[in-house]
Amino acid sequence: MATVTVGQFAVSQCTVAVNTSSSGTAVWSEIADLEEVNLSVENNIETWYSIAEEGWQNALLTAKALSGSFSGKRTLGDTGNDFLDGKRFAIGKDAEADFKITFPNDATLEFTAIVGITDILGAATNVAPLSGDLIGKGKPTFTAA
């Protein structure tokens, strides 16, 4: 894939990978057949009204949180897809995973998230789904290109 340095890019030009290693050295495995990944940053903003400001609102952004969702197809035999599906019935620390998104300009976003798989099957004519929610843990690491 060519590096994009100017203008827009398609989401399909990004790569989404999960760390499938259980040791200290990360092994980033792309997740086959992902159709959609949605991430958002929620902001916690505290507001107050000061006498000194004649009753006008003041504000301070005091916290952030990363969350999102993903959806795609269940693909047996793909390392990344199998790893995520392995979180289906996980609880506690076993439900955590490290993710890495690489953008077309080679910038990266790495984060740890709780993985909550939300579906099992569907209609008889559907391809088996793999989708769920991601709740970020801690501060993500963004590395500019």
Image (cartoon, rainbow, N blue to C red):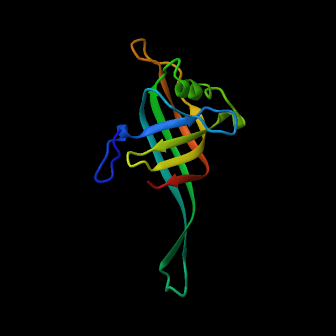
Quadrant of the rendering where the N terminus is positioned: top left
Front residue of 74/69: it is 74
Q: Is residue 17 above or below residue 111?
A: above
**Left or right: where 105 falls relative to 138:** left
Q: Is residue 135 left or right of residue 124?
A: right
**Please, is residue 65 above or below residue 87 in the view?**
below
Count all numbered tags in the image, as a single digit: 0
Q: Position of residue 18 (x, y in %)?
A: 55, 35
Q: Position of residue 115 (x, y in %)?
A: 59, 36
**Residue at left offset 48%, top offset 43%:** 101
Q: Quadrant of residue 22?
A: top right
Q: Position of residue 26 (x, y in %)?
A: 62, 38
**Residue at screen point 49% across, 86% down:** 54
Is 98 located above or below residue 51 in the figure? Answer: above
Residue extending farthest to the top is: 124
Quadrant housing the C terminus: bottom left
Q: In this rendered view, identify the residue nearer to me: 129 or 108.
A: 108
Q: Residue at x 54, y 88 (%)?
A: 52
Q: Quadrant of residue 95?
A: top right
Q: Nearer the viewer, residue 54 or 45?
A: 45
Position of 50 relative to 81 (above/below):
below
